[in-house]
Amino acid sequence: MPLFPVPRSLEWLDGPGPPPGAPLAVRHDPDLPEQGYSLDRDVSGTRIGYRDDAGLRYARQTLDQIEADRELAGRAVRVRDRPDFAVRGFMLDISRDRVPTRRALRRYVEILAAARMNQLELYTEHTFAFAGQEAVWAAASPLTGDDMRWLDALCAAHGITLVANQNTLGHMERWLATEPHRDRAEKPEGFSIGGRHRPPSTLEPTEENAAFAVGLVRELAATVRARRVNIGADEPWELGRGRSAADAADRGVGRVYLDQLLRIATPLLEDGFEVEFWADVLADHPAVARDLPTTGLIPVVWQYDGPEHARAALDRASEEQHRQWKIDGFDMEALAGGFRKRAEALTAAGRPFWVAPGTGAWKSFVGRLDNAVENVLDAADAGLEHGATGYVLTSWGDHGHHEPPTITYPPLLLAAAVSWCVETNRDLDLAAALDRVVFAEDAGLGAVLTAIGSVAAALDAPILNSSALFTVLFEGGDAAAVPAVTPAALAHAERVLADAAEALAPARPAGPDGDIAVRETAQAVELARFAVALLAAGGIAELTPNAAVDLLIRLDALLVEQRACWLLSARPGGLDDSLARFAPLRAALVGRALQ
């Protein structure tokens, strides 16, 4: 099917399509569903029906695709189409080191528009140039008010709503690390999770901190026209364990959380905003869900591993890992229930919600596409089952955001298609869609991206929210940090990656920034091949000094190219922090080389 996304209903009619010069009639039809359209083409001409501007835009997109395909253009067809989810969004993390250039943001907007996504969010912690807060963002190459206004206008021209997204409770470590804000911390001495100490990241739940957070949201929201914001409020790890411990012991962490959430959300609701927030805390405190306001507040249920992948990862995890999860208070078994289990607190309370799967690109180099496909479909199925009206694909940048934008494109297209109509797009030919929609020709990049995205699953070393290739590098080359991988699986991974590198070398895609896409993807492939080589050698502990020298030379060359590739689509702020993530691995290689 050469149409993207595949329409809900397409009928082949008897007879030919319109001859050259046949009339095109466009008619407003209030009986059509929102964003829906009708399209009829036969020998007498073309007729479009639409209810709203979005429906007309999507009808014209479909018509353009039909006319560009020789077989479709010559046949009479009837199309009836509408989306499964009214809001089909994409959220890009710009706070874990990688802040996109304007050119990279433009490219994302063009792809979102072609894929019929109608909302964009840029997840912000410290990477907006808030007035008077230079101590927080000075080294980050932040987006400015002018950047946001430019992007908002660009989005509006493409039928996309740009939503201000500013975290307001957890994930505030960059703020709390600066002198003006240290005393805002719930636990100033920091906290432990996963057996490691982390600096403070959660704001103390107070009226003053709520007012501070609301001020940040208002300042960011003033740069865009949307009357919807996302206040985050996820993963407040220290909540109830520091300054609010006595209150939490008395009333429960859930109540402490709800009070602070409403302190932040209520003024914004009164400003006339709809307010999105991440609903992870509600999963652990279902009683809180029943007390949420019913108007204007949008819980967004997120989950980033597909149920089958989560089950496999849990079954392969070590006893020590299970013990640590128990110490940290995580209900890991719930992950194997997917979005239906994650949303139980809200469905039991009869509360509407949105769903937010992930690209699976972060902590992977080349993606975890098999997991992303399962995750994206699970979100669509569960969302439809429970009447969700919003679907937001998330692309995070955990631990340095090393993967380039191209690695997000396969799950982005799939999520766009299934959030439009899950039933007709469930088995989408993703490689062909990538070449047609993103790269503007049959360049073969779609096949490359889908092939390398399969490597993580082919290793048969499932890890929650990460890949074995990423984990081994960022655990200092410790092969014991990942499930055992067979030599045959590693040999297969190397063949797939080597074939991809060979295919990329002559590729010259015609689409915008095609040369950048090729170079960035080639770099991601080489990082993944380095990780395969390290695992195949048995990790740092098994390296001979000569082998360590060879890998050290290879790593240094990769880091030089990583710096160059980063600057093709991202601003310089954050680059040094991102590359510093390789320091433990490099130090371990140096240590082995000197033995």
Image (cartoon, grey):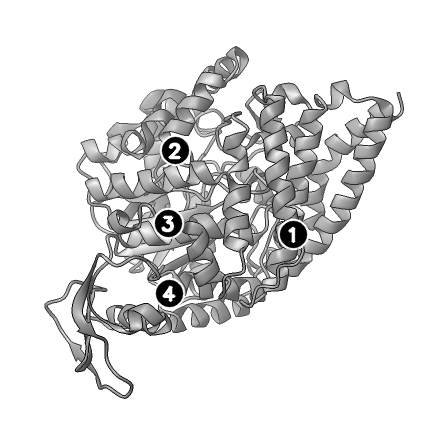
| Mark found first going from the N terminus, 3 or 4 | 4
State the separation of the CA atoms marked 1 and 3. 38 Å
Mark 1 lies on residue: 135
Q: Which circle, 1 or 3, is nearer the viewer?
A: 3
Which residue appears at 62% of the width and 59% of the height? 507
Displayed quadrant of residue 310: top left
Which callout, 4 or 1, points at the residue further toward the start of the chain?
Answer: 1
Q: Which residue is mark 3?
A: 415
Of the residues under marks 1 and 2, which one precedes in the sequence? Answer: 1
**Nearer the observer, disc 3 or disc 4?**
3
Amino acid residing under circle 1: Ala
Contact between labelled residues 3 and 2, with CB atoms less than 8 Å apart: no
Say above or below: 300 vs 130: above
Q: Locate the C terminus by quadrant.
A: top right
Q: Amino acid at mark 4?
A: Ile
Task: Give coordinates of residue 420: x percent, y percent.
Answer: 29, 55
Q: Residue furthest front?
A: 15
The residue under label 4 is 160
Instruction: Give the CA distance from mark 3 to mark 4.
Output: 16 Å
Q: Identify the residue position indicated by label 2 in the image.
A: 306
Judged from the image, the secondary structure of the residue bearing numbered disc 3 is helix
Mark 4 residue element:
loop
Q: Is residue 521 left or right of residue 394?
A: right
Closer to the observer: label 4 or label 1? 4
Report the amino acid beneath label 3.
Ala
